Image: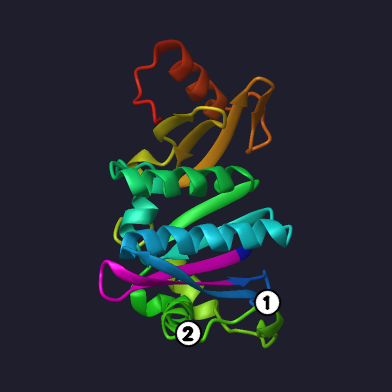
Amino acid sequence: MHKIFFDGACNPNPGPTGCGAVIFDGQNNVVAELSIFNGHGTNNQAEYSALIYALEKAIELGIRKATVYGDSKLVINQLNGVWNCNDTALRVLNKRAMKLCYELEFIELCWIKRITNSHADKLSQDALEGTSISDAQVKTKKEQLVDVIQSNKDNKTPSNVVNINEQRLNEITAVHYYKGVGFSVIQNSKLYAINLNPLSCSCANLKCEHINAAIAYSQTQQIHKSV
C-alpha cells in the first residue's frame, strides 16, 4: 500500500501559496516529492491543491491503492463527507479532488497532526521560498516511516483518523452525486466510487451495499445532492 502525505502553505493568508507532497511505496521508499509554488490564494486552497497535485502524481505513477495523510481537518473532513463544502472556490477543488479519488481502486483519507507531517510541510515551505524541486530531484533514499504509520494505526480515534466510530463500523455515513462523474459513498472512513450505468463499484463487488446506497439515493433523493 502506498502512502501519500500532503500539505499546503500560505503566508500571509490569503497570500502566496506553496504545495508539498511526498509519496512512499509499500517498503517506505520515497517514489516522488512535489514542491510547487501555487500562486495567490488561501491556506485552504493550498491544502486542496497540494492533495490534487499528489493524487495526479500518484495516478501518473500507476498507483492504484493508497492511504493519504494530511493535517488539514477541513480537507479530510470534507472529502470524507463529515463536513459540507460551502465555499464556492473550495467546491471546485473539492470536486476535482473527489474525481481523482475515483480513479484509485482504494483510498483512505486520514488526518494527522502537523508534527507528523513535517516532510510534506517542508516541501510546501520550500515552494514559498522559491526552492521548488522537480521530478529529476526526487530522493531515492529509504525513509523510515514505520513509527509514524504504526502510531497512526494504534490511535485511530476521531481526533486522529476522521470518521472512525467503533459503534458505527459498518454504517454508510455519506452519499454524494456528482453530475457527469458518478456517486461517492463513505463507509468506515473509506471512499468508494460507484457508477450505475454501467454498474460498477471501486470495491469490485457488484452486489455491495455501496451500490445499494447509490441506488437508494437515486430513487429517493433523500440525501443531499452535491452540484
- Write the start and end of the magenta stretch as one range: 3-22
User: Residue 176 sits in which quadrant?
Assistant: top left
- The residue labelled by disc 2 is 130
Residue 3: image quadrant is bottom right
- Residue wearing tag 1: 135
Question: Quadrant location of the C terminus?
Answer: top left
For the point 63% across and 38% down, the residue is 203
Instruction: Please state the total of marks drawn on the protein image.
Output: 2
Q: What percent of the width, then of the height, locates residue 66?
A: 60, 58
> Magenta stretch: residue 225 in it?
no
Residue 21 highlighted magenta (yes or no)? yes
Question: Foreground residue, 166 or 17?
Answer: 17
Residue type of the residue flagged with mark 1: Asp
Indicate which label's residue lies in the foreground, 1 or 2: 2
- Crowding near the residue tagged with mark 2, few <14, some 14–19, many ≥20 C-alpha atoms within 10 Å: few
Above or below, 96 relative to 143? above
Task: Provide residue 145's location: percent of width, then percent of height.
Answer: 54, 79
- Residue 121, given in percent of the width and then of the height, sits at 42, 78
Asked whether the viewer can see residue 155, the reply is no
